[in-house]
Amino acid sequence: MARHPYLSLNVFLFVAMCLAWGLTFLPVKIAVVHVPPIFLAAARFSLAGLLLLAWAGRDAFKVPAQAWLRLVGTGLLVNSCNYALLFWGMAHAPSGLAAIINMATIPIYTVLASRVIEGHPISERRIAAVALGAVGLGFLFATRALGGLSAAKGDGLEFWGLAAIALGTFCHCVGAVLSRKIAGTMPTLTLAGWQTAIGALGLILLSFALEPVSGAHLRALVEWPTAPALAFVVIVGSLIGFTIFLRLLRDWGAFYAGLFAFVSPVIAVGAGVAALGEPFGWPEAVGALLMFGAAAIALRK
């Protein structure tokens, strides 16, 4: 049974997880200036996949034969499609807004994916969450299409960058829902490790097919500032953040563990404004509040 959060080590770990996932958007934003975005995602998940499978140890081989097809499909959705779109979008959009759209839409998209794939009914409350989330997304996109604060000063592809992030997040949620059928057939680290490694392979293929990757980009992976940025997202984002989330999922349940969706984006916005001078005005604040409200309704028991 899920327990109510209490003042303990888990509270500290929750704060650490929110910081880890909120701060990963900043190094990605910095690194995509120096290497192609999908190539960066491929490097991240190649390293993370190897480390997760090594961490799983003998359990890495505990994959039922009948689970492989779904494992491959979900790995491509959760990691290849999601992160190709997310990292490309972050090359053109502010890191704070990327975090808001990525994290605040996960509860909403999950509700929709669960309905379509598993036939779970959608309550009136969650219909309201989907509607409110759609209004919030629409508001953010409208400010970009009409030349909002960031659009006036930033990348001309910002609108499409945010759209790519929204689509990538939807791919992640579809893959996550499809993963439920095989989640109980293997250890959690085994599932995560293989999905990450399979996702990395897909990202490698996408990068070499779509991006002008050169030897200079390979060298950039081990040079400043790309190397420390890559190390941060692999170690802090993929390994430490994921490990803490698994513990909180066990101890607190999905609802309380999922509250990072309200904290991490705020950290990402603050980091983007402080470190990169990213603009964040009233249109962004209104859209963010609408989406946070939608996520709160969707997550509520």
Image (cartoon, rainbow, N blue to C red):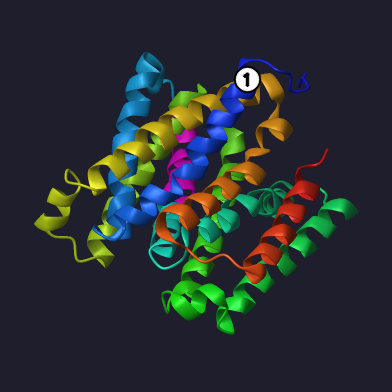
Total numbered labels: 1
Residue 35 spot, x, y in % from top left: 24, 57
As shown in the figure, which amino acid type bears the numbered disc 1? Asn
Residue 72 spot, x, y in % from top left: 42, 43
Q: Nearer the viewer, residue 169 or 239?
A: 239
63 to 274, vertically: above or below: above
- Per the image, the residue denoted by label 1 is 10
The span shown in magenta is 65-79
Q: Nearer the viewer, residue 139 or 192?
A: 139
Give the quarter of the image for residue 208: bottom left
Give the quarter of the image for residue 169: bottom right
**Residue placed at 80% from the left, 49% from the top?**
297
| Magenta region includes residue 293 | no
Residue 264 spot, x, y in % from top left: 58, 43
**Residue placed at 11% from the left, 57% from the top?**
216
Left or right, residue 12 beside residue 301:
left
Which residue extends farthest bottom?
146
Left or right, residue 243 beside residue 287:
left
Which residue extends farthest right?
124
Q: Which SS class for mark 1?
A: helix
| Magenta region includes residue 70 | yes
Q: Is residue 221 visible?
A: yes
**Residue placed at 17% from the left, 46% from the top?**
223
237 to 156, vertically: above or below: above
Magenta: main secondary structure: helix
Residue 114 spot, x, y in % from top left: 70, 48
Q: Is residue 64 visible?
A: no
Left or right, residue 143 beside residue 23:
right
Give the quarter of the image for residue 38: bottom left
